[in-house]
Amino acid sequence: MEGEPTLRLRIFDLNCWAIRYLSKRRQERVRLIGDRLCQEGFDLVLLQEVWSEQDYSHLKVKLAGCYPFSHYFRSGVIGSGLCVFSRFPILDTLLYQYSLNGYPYMLQHGDWFCGKSVGLGVSLGITAPFLSLSLQLHAEYCRDKDAYLPHRLVQAWELAQFIRHTSKAADVVLLGGDLNMHPEDVGIRLLRGWTGLRDAFAEATRFEGCKNGCTLVPDNCFTDKSELLPFPLGIRIDYILYKAISSFTVKCEELKTTTGSARGTDIPFSDHEAVMATLHIQRQGQPASATLGTADLALADVVTEARTEVGVGLRAARRQRYSSGRMAVLALLLLLLQAAAALGTLAGLGAEQPFPKLSFCLLAFLALGVLVLATGLHLFHTMEVKMLHGTEDQMWMALRALQERP
Amino acid sequence: MEGEPTLRLRIFDLNCWAIRYLSKRRQERVRLIGDRLCQEGFDLVLLQEVWSEQDYSHLKVKLAGCYPFSHYFRSGVIGSGLCVFSRFPILDTLLYQYSLNGYPYMLQHGDWFCGKSVGLGVSLGITAPFLSLSLQLHAEYCRDKDAYLPHRLVQAWELAQFIRHTSKAADVVLLGGDLNMHPEDVGIRLLRGWTGLRDAFAEATRFEGCKNGCTLVPDNCFTDKSELLPFPLGIRIDYILYKAISSFTVKCEELKTTTGSARGTDIPFSDHEAVMATLHIQRQGQPASATLGTADLALADVVTEARTEVGVGLRAARRQRYSSGRMAVLALLLLLLQAAAALGTLAGLGAEQPFPKLSFCLLAFLALGVLVLATGLHLFHTMEVKMLHGTEDQMWMALRALQERP
């Protein structure tokens, strides 16, 4: 099978930080991104945090010439923020929404409202049909005391399972996105170990861009400098990952990142740096050997570590479920007591004393509010417990399968 | 490849109607189901509506001898109710939760709280690895004025897409579940057309059981007779569907349903009848011809019909989103007016008139309640619009692909 056609695939990945009314100089930046994409002519563009469908429509019109195929993934209250532009036809899409994604009452973090998901597009390249995934995982707001770690691990696990189950008939899998995890974090190790995906930064023959491939750097005028204090060089949380499944090989020829300002302007594209990879896809005579199975022991360790963290999250969720349930019961009791008192007064008991209508009303109001809130929280944490427990179970099944492998 | 091993696979599918505190004679029925499963020794058992994990645990202990492998799928507030028992090892599982599943405020219907999903188990039979899916779609509460039709169509579409994307490397796909749709409904036609799944009832060489394969029959003492008035023979809403993907053929030798009471007792297993199929799986020399592509025109009609219904749902959801948003704005305005009045009173304006504290409090209470509720509804319907819109888009993409097919 020598002389088989090869494909040089150029991929662009960026977290666009395009939140309406909140992101600085949004429209200007979206215009700049569109300009650059037109000039460079990539093959595949994976964007995240395009929260406004209007921005997507503008980009779609602008890019229609060089990227005739595109898809916007809708989910959640605000949207998934994910979209894909492609030079190759997008044959099919599928959206998988993570079962856990933060807490609705953490309004300042807002992850819950986004309906974070992974969007999958099946495209047909010249050589091979490939799956491309665009995604974003739950943000890390505090590295030292990371309350969202179990949620992010559930997402990483679900993502890995989703990739394993959907990629079996694909020739090449490409994943680009803001994983919100450092390269050595357990979630990344879990995702890479369980799917066999390879990190374009680590595999690239040539690299050009921010030191260590960082994508959140202090040089970018939009980044929050206080967040990056412990990391003077910046952090790497945006990735392009890939793997070949059947009789193909994929090599990363070159990886680039932007370095602060966009070419010829004074502002960067986003608070994240863009990641651009050039991949070299070629058909091989014999099927590529499976990446899985070579390091089962190390993989079992990673799964065990992740399962421990999920267990920690499960216990916390159970405590919260219990305390919100208790709060709801107490509020209900208070309301019942009040109802009894009101009925007693109506029946003429204690008529010699004046009935404190105003404070009675205020108290009832408070009790009802607490009841509604606590019930909502109880339902939410019940769901959380179910999903964490389910993931713990699945990880256990995976560990058993790893251990039983000959 | 003559003389290849064949596999006779016996499948049992039942909607168990095991809702704690609500379902009649639940424990007795779960015991009966366990007894029957032990006696008959099926290969694969797909159960729905096992809402209590305790019931699952009892069954698991009881069936450990004949069905050494099992899995319970957790999701939503109450759970998914899905579980699988198998004589073959379950290698991997995946749960896909539908993005739309009724309304949280329709408490009497309760579908929203169940986290309805499709559970996927990968098993390794003697001849072939197969995917088995256990699932339940949104219930139909009123056939004439079916407000949930768009949601059920979104679920049918997501299910079909999920099957298409996950089954590519499987040899055989088996699906058993309560689809809550009559055989000729658009959702069933969509699911079958888009995936190529075949209906065991229609294909069976031998059939034994309720007339027309009905699974909700008036003879069953637990069914709601008023619901079945327009259908004196009953309705068929529980299905076993299957297809062979690679070089295998699957034939349905026999299909049976229970007919009211369980053998030797006075009560049925559930308000639904169980469906039992015997499939004959054999390897073939050449790959089985794809079921898709043979009737693209008919399929395009079905997708168009489904898309129209989803569009109707989308317009309704948009109206509800608008009216709940307007209600929230009005409530907010009322609260602001009240705040202004209260401030005015505090500042000494209108001091000559008595301030009606109680009615003021009650009105504020009402306005706040309406604000919270209307905001919640607005968020929910925003999500609904996103998902319906996304599905409409995906169906359009599918139609385009069908039309462009040579």
Image: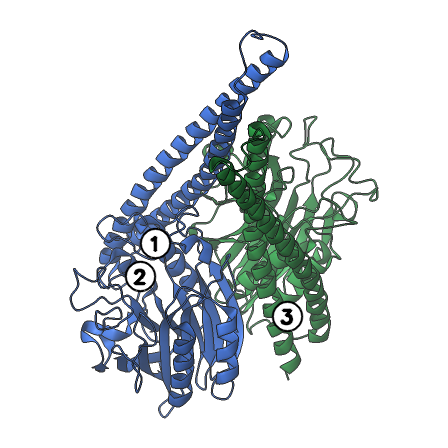
Chain colours: A blue, B green
- From this view, report whether residue A85 is shown above or below residue A348: below
Mark 2 is on which residue type? Asn
- Left or right: A252 in relation to B196: left
Number of the front mark, 2 or 3: 2
Do marks 1 and 3 share a chain? no
Q: Are marks 2 and 3 in contact (CB under 8 Å)?
A: no
Residue B265 on image: x %, y % = 68, 26
Do marks 2 and 1 share a chain? yes
- From this view, report whether residue A226 is shown above or below residue B19: below
Q: Are marks 2 and 1 in contact (CB under 8 Å)?
A: yes
Q: CA distance from mark 2 to mark 3?
A: 42 Å
Do marks 2 and 3 share a chain? no
Q: Badge 3 local density, few (<14 within 10 Å), some, or many (20+)? A: some
Q: Chain of mark 3?
A: B
Q: Is residue B116 visible?
A: no
- Left or right: A267 in relation to A321: left
Residue drawn at x 25%, y 50% as measured from the top left: A305
Residue wearing tag 1:
A152
Mark 3 is on which residue type? Thr
Residue wearing tag 3:
B291
- Left or right: B279 in relation to A55: right
Number of the front mark, 1 or 3: 1
Q: CA distance from mark 2 to mark 1?
A: 9 Å
Toward the viewer: B337 or A215? B337
Residue B157 on image: x %, y % = 61, 61
Toward the viewer: B235 or B199? B235
Provide the secondary structure element on which disc 1 rests.
helix
Residue wearing tag 2:
A180
Residue drawn at x 57%, y 19% as measured from the top left: A339
- From this view, report whether residue B211 is shown above or below residue A294: above
